[in-house]
């Protein structure tokens, strides 16, 4: 095995991270303000230094190999630590407070990636993140209780949102039970402000299909559990389907679901001291989520 270099160029790691997260050398080049060929050469250089293949190239873009996935996790931590040190000791860090709202369905992914990166980049910023339904987040924005939020465009359509990605809602049913044969379809739903609840009920009412809410919860994990245990059918993002679930559609007598778009919204009034921090968080959200959502290639409802 070839000897690994004793030092790695952080610029190589940044380009690798961008390509791996975005799934595209072209998107990575745009984000890094470089040419596609330059990004490709940096990736090859990194692979040569580590004596390992990091990305698999295909017609739809690039996907990390097993080694690449491991390196991606370590790269995130390394760059967060590096950028945090620079911000603290170079005196270039932002200050202030930013109040950020996000739907609960996205919390796991954003808390595991985007928000820790933001706090590492800007350790002097007081980040206050809250989860709620899209309808409730819209109201909190209107009351200036949040500075910015990711909100789906249903059931309340807020004007002036910046598109981030489109979701992939599907009918999710338990793998071991057939609930579609019942006269009234048993559903597991969020509260009335949930966009996926609106998608489900609107589609069924257009079809004239009777339904009832057998289980209601504010927790996405409780909704998923109700589906897995055979209690109900629900509408989830395709990426949230587990081995205990199966996707249903028109072949099972269920209507086609509408589409949702995740949008970034700023409050109409933000305290002057919070504006730079809110703008910095918004830029990171655009960088990480635009066109693909919290998961590689797809978003959630």
Image (cartoon, grey):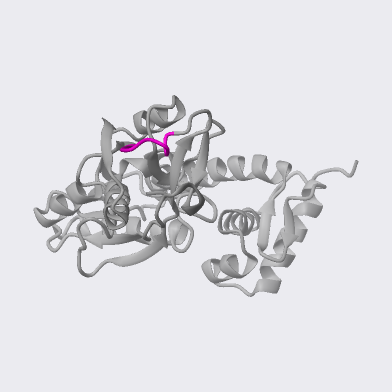
Q: Which of 129 and 95 is in front in this view?
A: 129
Residue placed farthest to the right in the image?
A: 1
Residue at 18 percent of width and 47 percent of height? 136
Q: Does the magenta stretch include residue 254?
A: no
**Which image quarter is the N terminus in?**
top right
Q: Where is residue 146 in the image (x, y as percent from the top left)?
A: 18, 50
Q: Where is residue 237 in the image (x, y as percent from the top left)?
A: 44, 47
Number of numbered discs overlaid on the protein picture: 0
- Specify start and end residues of the magenta stretch as a single range: 179-185
- Point out residue 225 in the picture as x, y percentages from the top left corner: 41, 27
Q: Is residue 10 visible?
A: yes
Answer whether residue 279 is visible to the viewer in this image. Answer: no
Q: Extreme left residue here? A: 143
Q: Locate residue 288, reporting x and y percent.
A: 46, 56
Residue plotted at (41% across, 61% down) = 166
On screen, residue 222 above or below 105:
above
Magenta stretch, main secondary structure, is: loop
- Who's the residue at 26% across and 51% down the image? 198
* Left or right of residue 80, residue 71 in this image: right
Above or below residue 277? Residue 89 is above
Up-down relation of residue 105 to residue 43 (above or below)? above
Residue under the point 27% across and 49% down: 201
**240 or 202, which lies in front?**
202
Determine which quarter of the picture holds residue 73: top right
């Amino acid at each position: 095995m070839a000897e690994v270099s004793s030092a790695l160029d952080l610029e190589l790691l940044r380009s690798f991270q961008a390509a791996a997260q975005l799934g595209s050398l072209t998107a990575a080049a745009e984000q890094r303000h470089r040419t596609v060929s330059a990004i490709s050469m940096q990736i090859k250089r990194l692979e040569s230094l580590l004596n390992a293949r990091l990305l698999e190239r295909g017609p739809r873009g690039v996907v990390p190999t097993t080694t690449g996935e491991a390196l991606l996790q370590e790269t995130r931590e390394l760059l967060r630590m590096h950028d945090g040190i620079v911000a603290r000791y170079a005196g270039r860090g932002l200050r202030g407070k930013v109040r950020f709202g996000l739907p609960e369905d996205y919390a796991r992914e954003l808390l595991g990636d985007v928000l820790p990166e933001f706090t590492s980049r800007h350790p002097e910023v007081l980040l206050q993140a809250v989860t709620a339904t899209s309808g409730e987040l819209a109201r909190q924005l209107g009351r200036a209780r949040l500075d910015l939020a990711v909100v789906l465009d249903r059931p309340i359509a807020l004007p002036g949102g910046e598109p981030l990605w489109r979701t992939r809602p599907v009918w999710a049913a338990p793998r071991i039970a057939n609930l579609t044969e019942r006269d009234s379809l048993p559903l597991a739903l969020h509260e009335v402000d949930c966009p996926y609840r609106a998608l489900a009920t609107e589609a069924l009412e257009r079809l004239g299909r009777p339904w009832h809410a057998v289980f209601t919860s504010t927790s996405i994990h409780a909704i998923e559990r109700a589906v897995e245990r055979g209690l109900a059918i629900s509408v989830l993002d395709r990426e949230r389907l587990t081995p205990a679930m199966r996707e249903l559609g028109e072949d099972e007598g269920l209507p086609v679901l509408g589409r949702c778009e995740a949008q970034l919204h700023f409050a109409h009034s933000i305290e002057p001291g919070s504006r730079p921090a809110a703008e910095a968080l918004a830029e990171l959200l655009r960088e990480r989520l635009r066109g693909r959502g919290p998961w590689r290639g797809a978003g959630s409802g």
